Each structure stands twice: as C-alpha cells, then as structure tokens.
Image (cartoon, rainbow, N blue to C red):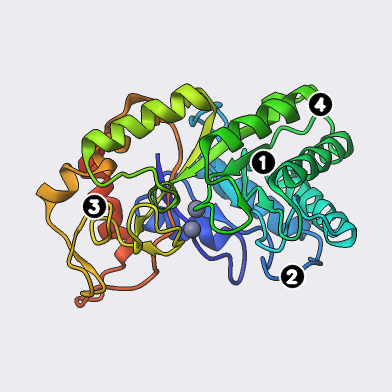
Amino acid sequence: MFGSHLSIAGSMVNALVEAEGLGMECVQVFTKNQQQWKAKPLDDGMVREWHAKVKALGWDRGGPDGRGGLVSHASYLINLASCKDDLWAKSVDLMQDEIERCEALAIPYLVHHPGSFVGADLATGMNRIIDAYAELFSRTKGYRTVSCLEGTVGAGSTIGGRFEELADLRARIADQTGQGGRLAFCLDTCHMHAAGYDLSTRAQGEAVIAEFDRVCGLSHLGVLHCNDSKGKAGSKLDRHEHIGEGWIGGTVKPHAGKGTYTPARLRDSGFAAWMAHPAMINVPKILETPKVNDAKGKPYDLINLRRLRMLAGV
Ligand SMILES: [Zn+2]
Ligand SMILES: [Zn+2]
C-alpha cells in the first residue's frame, strides 16, 4: 500500500480526501501542530468525521496487522533519549499525547525518531529511551497503536543510524515492559542510504534488506518511508529528493545539485529491491518528498507514486 505525508490544515479529514484524490491506499499525518508542545484536545466531531471517512475508504482494513495502513508521525520536539530531566519528562508527556491521539483516531502506526543523547553517551541515551517506554506503556496499558522506532541518518548524537541500535531498543523495551507487540520499526530509504546502507544498486538494496532481516526481522517492519537522497551513501545528510532524482535512484553529476531520472537507472537501484520484495506488499510505503508540481502543474506525489508502483509491478 502506498501513501504520502499530507497536510491536516483545516481538518484532519482533509489529508484522507487528498490521499484519495491522489489514488493512494493510506496516508501519514501529524495529529497536531508538530512544532508545539501543547495541543488542543481532538474535537469530537472531527474524530467522528475521520472515522466515517476512514471506514468509507476501507482504510481500516488490510496492512501489516489487518488494521489498515494509516500512519501518524510524532512531533520532532520529542526527545526520549534526552539526559536533561525536564526535556525528557516533557517528551514523555507529549509522546503519551501522541499515542492517545492515535488510539482515538484508530491509527495503527505512530512513527517517531528514537532521540539524541546530546551531552551524554550512546548507552545513556538508549537507557533513557527504555525508561521512557516503560513509563509510556504503563500509562497507556493495552492500547493498540504500534509505535515505530524510525531509522535515522545517525548524524552526531542521533540514535537509530544502525540497525543494531534499533534492534537493541526494541528487544530491551519488550523485555522491560512485556508489551513488545506494541513496538515495530519504520525505515526510510533516504536515511538508510545516508547512514551508510548503500542503496544505489538493486544488488546492494537486496543486501540491505537481508541485513535488516538478520538484525531486526522484516516481520517487525511497520512502515517504510520512500524518499530518494540528496546526499551520497554515508553522507549523514537527511535531505529527501524525488524518487529517481537523487543518489539512490537517479544519475547524479557532482555539483549538478539534482539527478536525472531514467526508468532504467531506477530499475537498477535499491528502490527496485525494496518495492519488489514480497514482505513489502502490505507495508504502508509513505512518500516524504518535496510537495511541488512539475512544469505542467502535476503534483510530484503522483509522479513519485507512479515510479514506485512501476517497481512494485502494481
Ligand atoms: Zn522518514
Ligand atoms: Zn528524513
């Protein structure tokens, strides 16, 4: 199933309507203004309207868990790895709000970045995340929303650039809370490539899938973010490019700033390996590429979607 991160401006239901208009099967949203610590509670009428539209679209069915492929992305303000007590406590409170909003909206997947251990070390940061989840899962016991630890480019003190870190977090949180079923992973093709998991050829893409399966387990992949990369493999640059126009699937001339799209090059890129893999069929595959139109005024989401679907053979 394919979707995109779309805007909830006006009303949350607008993202569903826009995704439907673009011919998608799912959507990713923020359930609140992602730049604010405090959010107004969800409006009851808006929640009812959301459920009615989701049901009408049939987007409460299918997907990895049979509950559809709707995805929420948590606020970037949240840092569960923080060693500063006040920021950590605020982050846990906001993450609780994110989980509760997903539960109210029956959104099965909540994606978030594991966090940054700035001012401390990796081991301390990992422990802080595990403590945060112990608190979160006890405050929200029995909730159905699955939180997905997102792989990052691993720049600086950011956690999640290595599959081993993601696997370790999930295993230890499952151990600590006994609620491991509420935790999965989200991968991002741009992040993997920039983190050093080179996806620029189909063979390398297949090797990265095998590596993720070995370390984390493909069955624990909840969401896949589909973005090409403005940075080379290992650049640690988190900048998303249109599919087939970056260093993963395009032909990029150094200093040209942008890659050239050709179907043949894209078919030999790591995108082909990921899109054609049978384990990906039911995984929500979400575009987070720039929301612009081409010269003819066509939304680039439609163009990126067509390129991914070509590779998936759907
Ligand atoms: Zn992403
Ligand atoms: Zn990113």
Is the N terminus in the top left, top right, bottom left or bottom right quadrant? top left
Q: Amino acid at mark 2?
A: Gln
Mark 2 or mark 4, whichever is nearer to me: 4
Instruction: Report the number of numbered marks.
Output: 4
**Percent of width and height locating residue 198:** 33, 44
- Between discs 1 and 4, the one toward the N terminus: 1
Badge 1 local density, few (<14 within 10 Å), some, or many (20+)? many
Ligand 1 within 8 Å of the CB at mark 1: no
Identify the residue position indicated by label 1 in the image. Answer: 106
Q: Which residue is found at the position 23% from the left and 50% from the top?
A: 307
Describe the element under mark 1 as helix, strand or loop: loop
Q: CA distance from mark 2 to mark 1?
A: 22 Å
In the rendered image, is residue 164 in sight?
yes
Identify the residue position indicated by label 3 in the image. Answer: 249
Question: Picture quarter containing residue 259?
Answer: bottom left
Choose between 287 and 198: the one closer to the eye: 198
Ligand 1 within 8 Å of the CB at mark 2: no
Q: CA distance from mark 1 to mark 4?
A: 25 Å
- Between discs 3 and 1, the one toward the N terminus: 1
Q: Which residue is found at the position 56% from the left and 49% from the top?
A: 53
Circles 2, 1 touching at the beta carbon (< 8 Å): no
Q: Amino acid at mark 3?
A: Gly
Q: Which mark is residue 36?
A: 2
Choose between 52 and 286: the one closer to the eye: 286
Describe the element under mark 2 as helix, strand or loop: loop
- Taking 70 as reference, is 2 left or right? left
Q: CA distance from mark 3 to mark 4?
A: 40 Å
Is the C terminus in the top left, top right, bottom left or bottom right quadrant? top left
Q: Amino acid at mark 1?
A: Ala
Ligand 1 within 8 Å of the CB at mark 4: no
Mark 1 or mark 4, whichever is nearer to me: 4
Identify the residue position indicated by label 4 in the image. Answer: 176
